[in-house]
Image: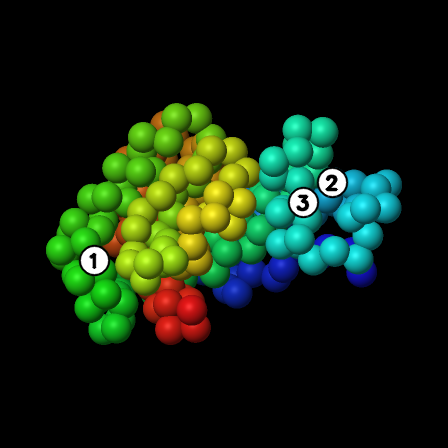
Amino acid sequence: MAFELPKLPYAENALADAGMCQETLELHHGKHHQAYVTALNGFVESKPELAGKALEEIIALSHADSSLAPVFNNAGQHWNHCIFWNCLSPNGGRIPGALEKKLTEDFGSVDAFKAAFKQAATTQFGSGWAWLVLGSDGKLKVTKTANAANPLSEDEGRALLGLDVWEHSYYLDFRNRRPDYVTNFLDRLANYEYAESCLKGA
């Protein structure tokens, strides 16, 4: 079965009041993400070794194989964006109790977590992602990855939150001001309820 572009869990204009305009979502979801899905399906059709494999299996198979770099780039970006859309909410920024307790335990405070996340997101040179991850040791940590890489491909743990820091994700709303985009995400857009549900499901 071919991979499909997931539907957004909110309307395309639902995030505008929180700092992500409808045009950004239309382009990012409908054009950029769709392009990754289309390309990935093309590779699956042309490479018998990929037929019938789940997305996670394709990422595992391709991430360390330079001959499959284009496959990984599109599979990784499909996986990343599927998480990203769930990490945004029109009612974002509110951290539920269990997650707040865990963030405080592992980072010292919510503010310390936000500072670490912002540091990762703003120092990722060029294109990439910032992540809140539950590590194999049971502790939360912040990581960053370049281009299409992610906590799955890097074996860093379970992704709870992911932020796209490719320029197309924020240029219409924030131009080149990535730090402002990251702060706005943490304070107004981040779906911490989703992060908590992933934490509880780990």
Q: Which residue is mark 1?
A: 106
- Disc nearer the start of the sequence (2/3): 2
For discs 2 and 1, the disc positioned in front in the rendered view = 1
- Tell me if mark 2 has few (under 14), some (14-19) or many (20+) residues whose alpha carbon lies within 10 angstroms of its own: some
Query: Which secondary structure lies at badge 3?
Result: helix
The amino acid on which the numbered mark 1 sits, given as a three-letter code, is Asp
| Residue 115 in sight | yes
Tell me: residue 125, above or below residue 116.
Answer: above
In three-dimensional space, the C-alpha distance between marks 2 and 3, rounded to whole angstroms, equals: 17 Å
Tell me: residue 29, above or below residue 197.
Answer: above
Residue 181: percent from the left, percent from the top?
Answer: 33, 41
Which of the 4 image quadrants contains residue 55?
bottom right
Left or right: 17 as drawn, with respect to 53 = left
Query: Which secondary structure lies at badge 1?
Result: helix
Q: Which residue is mark 2?
A: 39
Left or right: 185 as drawn, with respect to 87 = left
Q: Which residue is mark 3?
A: 61
- Tell me if mark 1 has few (under 14), some (14-19) or many (20+) residues whose alpha carbon lies within 10 angstroms of its own: some
In three-dimensional space, the C-alpha distance between marks 1 and 3, rounded to whole angstroms, equals: 32 Å
